[in-house]
Image: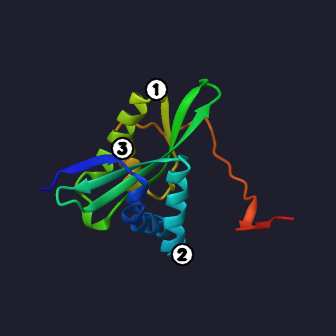
Amino acid sequence: MSAVHTRLALLGDVGRIAPLFDAYRQFYAQPADLARATQFLHDRLSRRESLILLATLDDGAVAGFCQLYPTFCSIDAAPIYTLSDLFVSPSARRLGVGRVLLQAAERLAANRGVVRLELTTAHTNQTAQALYESLGWCRDEIYRTYTLAVLRQAGTAIA
């Protein structure tokens, strides 16, 4: 069995991560768009708006990624990370890649003085929920999440 290695992604890794990011978006019912996925990741990393943990196998193959957005919690008056994206290549599933990425995210957060990691997932994504809970993540029973669509499509404001 191949070992899973993680490290922070660099701007030069965007081309390796983008196909997985595009597959991740497709998992959430978005159309395939590798150019958009590539540009989005490039913008996030070049602007230092996110941190991406890259998982590889012994042979160097990209196995998965985890994207974290630094933000703050006003109640805790402290920094937190929003774990926005976690995806494992279908060929690397059942190798523990997701678990290794989540543990790496926790270590990174602790090393940087971040007090909490937060994430949301689809109600139907029971596989991910089981993984999160096995690692000590707790489902929020106090707060509800709401969203408001501000733009219907790129560049078009809702009147």
Viewer-proximal residue among 35 and 97: 35
Question: What amino acid is found at the position of numbered circle 1 in the picture?
Answer: Gly
Viewer-proximal residue among 70 and 92: 70
Residue for badge 3: 102
Q: Residues within 10 Å of mark 3 (few under 14, many from 20)?
A: many
Residue for badge 1: 113
Task: Give the Cα separation between the discs numbered 2 and 3.
Answer: 27 Å
Q: Which mark is residue 28?
A: none
**Residue 4's x, y, as percent?**
22, 51
Question: What amino acid is found at the position of numbered circle 2 in the picture?
Answer: Pro
Residue 94 appears left or right of 73: left
Which corner quadrant holds the N terminus? Answer: bottom left
**Residue 100's x, y, as percent?**
29, 45
Residue 37 appears left or right of 144: left
Question: What amino acid is found at the position of numbered circle 3 in the picture?
Answer: Leu
Q: Is residue 52 above or below residue 26?
A: above
**Residue 45's x, y, as percent?**
50, 52
